[in-house]
Every structure is written in C-alpha cells, then in structure tokens.
Image: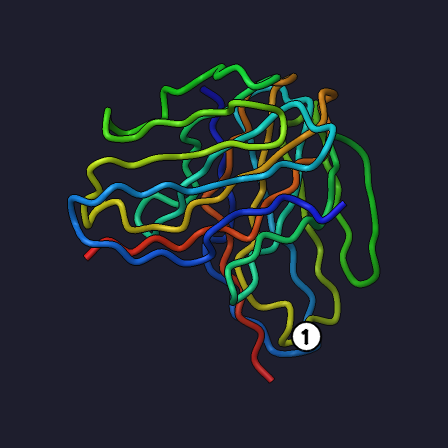
Amino acid sequence: GIQVEQSPPDLILQEGANSTLRCNFSDSVNNLQWFHQNPWGQLINLFYIPSGTKQNGRLSATTVATERYSLLYISSSQTTDSGVYFCAVRVYNNDMRFGAGTRLTVKP
Amino acid sequence: DAGVIQSPRHEVTEMGQEVTLRCKPISGHDYLFWYRQTMMRGLELLIYFNNNVPIDDSGMPEDRFSAKMPNASFSTLKIQPSEPRDSAVYFCASTPVSNTEAFFGQGTRLTVV
C-alpha cells in the first residue's frame, strides 16, 4: 500500500517563529488532507489540497502531486498551534492513509 | 449538519466485556471509515464502508472485532471480548461519494481494565 512519511517528527518553536512541515507519499494520490490534532484529541481539518496552494490565515499548504510531496507552512506561530499535524492521502475512492504526524510545541 | 457523531465519548470496561462503539456519519456521505489511534501505532485504518457495504476490513486486528453499517446513517464497531490492549481512541470519519474532504468525529476513548 501507499506509504506516507512526515517530517520532522517533533518540532519545538518559540512563539512568533515560522515553520514548514513536510509530507512525502510513495504513489500518485487523488486526495490529500492536512489535519491538526489539538491537545483534546480532536482532528481538525486544515486543508483539502490534492494539488496546488491554499492559504487560510497564518497557515498555507502546497502540494506538488507530480513530485509526491506536500508542505504545510505555519507563520507567526502561537501557543494554540501546538499539537500534532497529520497528513492523510487517498487514491481515488480507496482507503485514507495517515502519516505518523509531526508533534509541534510552541513555547511562549 | 452536526458533523460526524460518535458515542460514547468515553468508555471504561472490564476485560472480557463486550463493547459497542457507535457512529453517525454526515448525511449524504457514502463512505465511512473506522480508525484506531494508539501511541505505538498511530492512526490505523480498521475498516471502511461504501454505501453501507464493507469494502476493506483487512485492518481489523482480530476476530474479536466486528463492524456493521445497517443503514446510511449508522455504524457500529463491536469488540467481544475486550482486552486491555484494545485501549485506544477510536475515530469514525465520513466522506462524500466523490473523492473530497473527510470529516472526523470526536472519537471514543476506550479503556479496558
């Protein structure tokens, strides 16, 4: 099956810093999403981005499907950005596979 | 729509007991997924349904686990008998028929003692 690798596994930032999270996948995909799991365990949808670039406030994401990777940018990080960020991919209408996540800690 | 609804939010049970987790997908969504999350294994896909039919249950760990979707608005995941190693957070998610955004429920935290 398709493999999804996220990097880095852990990231510690000072409030106000910027960061880039990466998601590599082993095969062509038709669907890619980024999620944020907050400290209460909820999986929050950030982006549905099978290709191209999207922005939502301080967050933006870019997927280069032909090169099999996606990037999540967080600018001017805040303590509320802490949590685990997951990338999930799907091929056509098949199952959705998750990476292991990047654990982000933003310190005040 | 209220989103994907899971119940209960927390479940504590004794080893050997039967446990049933419930999920109501978003209305109109044709795909339903059950995931299990643990520290060791991350988010694992257990089973998914399309139009109430199980498509892939290769992620179901053992015969103790079973899942059903009797209609488009309800699914259950049952563990019988439960064991301490089944302790995890179980998530349900749904997507529309087209290959678009998936939405997750708030999860059920299961503790088997």
Residue A65 lies left or right of residue B44; in this view the side is right
Quarter-wise, where is residue B36 in the image? top left
- In x, y percent, where is residue A8? 50, 53
- Pick the quarter of the image with the C terminus of chain B: bottom left
- Pick the quarter of the image with the N terminus of chain B: top right
Q: Nearer the viewer, residue B13 or B43?
A: B13
The tally of labels here is: 1
Q: Residue at x 35, y 49 (%)?
A: B38
Check disc 1 and give the amino acid type.
Answer: Gln
Q: Residue at x 60, y 44 (%)?
A: B104
- In x, y percent, where is residue B62? 24, 27
Letter of the chain that mark 1 sits on in the rendering? A
Q: Is residue A105 above or below residue B97?
A: below
Quarter-wise, where is residue B47 in the image? top left
Q: Residue at x 34, y 53 (%)?
A: B110
- Please give the residue where the numbered disc 1 appears in the rendered image: A78
